[in-house]
Image: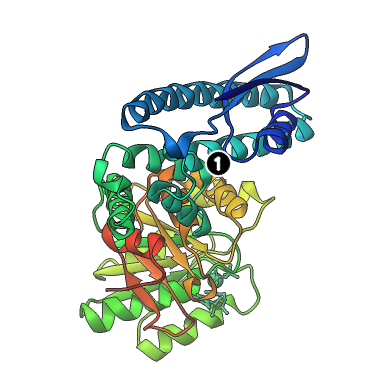
Amino acid sequence: MQIKRYDALSINEAMQKIKADMGRDAIVLSSRRLNGRLEVVAARDDNYEILKESEVEKCEKEESDTFSIIRSDVNELKSFIKDFKKQGGVYAELTEIKETMSLLFDVLGIQNNGRISSPLSKVYYHLISTGVSKQRACALIEELKKDSRAEDPDNYHYTLSAVENMMKRSITSSYRNTGKKRVSVFVGPAGDGKTTTLAKLAARCLFGDKLNVGIITMDTYRIGAVEQLKRYADIMGVPMEVASEKKELERVLNKFADKDVVLIDTPGKSRGDESYLLKLKKCFTMGLSMETNLVLSMTSSQESMMDAVARFGVINYNNIIFTKLDDSKKFGSIYNVIDHVGKPVFYVANGQNVPQDLNKMDPAKLARLIVGTGIRS
Ligand SMILES: Nc1nc2c(ncn2[C@@H]2O[C@H](COP(=O)(O)OP(=O)(O)OP(=O)(O)O)[C@@H](O)[C@H]2O)c(=O)[nH]1
Ligand SMILES: [Mg+2]
């Protein structure tokens, strides 16, 4: 085993030096700051492939020690980030730390048993290719390591289905305390598919469940919004009312007191109109039990989705509906969002056709969708 010490200004720079000097199989043993500079100790085992069985055990112990060192590095970096956030105006440093963490997650995810081609490493790469964040992919791999069969190189299929099951279990924990409500509200960023999804659900309640449906729109902002929903309501023969503020909303909700289901559409709000969200929140605090669906488009970037789940958190939404799955090839961001906010996903939309392009989802279907390549029943 070769062990070397590297001096650098940042972990990012140190990792580049290590990679260039010792190659991709090198692992970080320790790192510490000395007078503003960083000292990193890295190692590479040249004889890994010809290790005897007795040595493998020793090696695995060393490796798990290494991972705990890396894990402590990651924790250290996390606390750096917290401090930097407090200081503000340190975008460059944050970017560097983000890149460094990304590299560290790679080291954690790839270096399973020292073999880049191990089934766990393949699963790690697969998860990342679906859009699952490196941090979450690493956490799943760590969990997978508890299952010895998951490391069988001849049974990659088993390893993949094991990670799918783990994801299913993790998603299931977001489905606690859920229950259908009579009144359902649709909120979300502009153009993400609120009105279309509402129309699909209205048709499903009406024709599928034979329920008595009423529709309300609060979107008096966008030109043509009322007409858009009215067209759907007229085709289905469902009554529709318009309400732009709390009093009106109370009035039309009373009017729909006899309905089994009331669906409420709201205007799409993009960044920069936080006061509107507070106004919307006030509208919905009328002692009436209602569920709120946050509608998010799969065509949005991961950052935009995370931004939306944070901003609309003011409204305390109950569920998330992902739309435009037909316009996306990978679905890992669904897992990132669910894992982050812990809210259930009962529906996903995969097309513009009303009412057919809507799929009922559960944790098993979601996990299959994310790990696999599409919606299979
Ligand atoms: N490809 C695809 N397009 C969709 C889907 N859902 C909605 N759309 C389209 O996305 C566009 C916007 O949909 P809307 O339902 O009007 O979105 P919205 O969130 O109500 O928009 P605003 O009210 O303006 O905020 C329309 O052209 C829809 O046909 C979907 O699942 N897949
Ligand atoms: Mg709309």
Q: Position of residue 313 (x, y in %)?
A: 49, 44
Q: Residue furthest bottom?
A: 235
Q: Position of residue 358 (x, y in %)?
A: 37, 75
Q: Left or right: 170 with respect to 116? A: left
Asked whether the viewer can see residue 94, the reply is no
Considering depth in this image, is 5 or 35 the residue closer to the camera? 5
Considering depth in this image, is 22 or 211 the residue closer to the camera? 22
The residue singled out by tag 1 in the image is 106
Considering depth in this image, is 264 or 329 the residue closer to the camera? 329
Kind of residue indicated by mark 1: Asp
Q: Left or right: 256 with respect to 199? A: left
Q: Is residue 359 above or below residue 48?
A: below
Q: Left or right: 52 with respect to 107? A: left
Q: Residue at x 77, y 8 (%)?
A: 35
The quarter of the rendering in which ligand 2 is drawn is bottom right
Q: Is residue 330 above or below residue 199?
A: above
Considering depth in this image, is 364 or 237 the residue closer to the camera? 364
Q: How is the image coloured?
A: rainbow
Where is the C terminus found, in terms of image quarters? bottom left
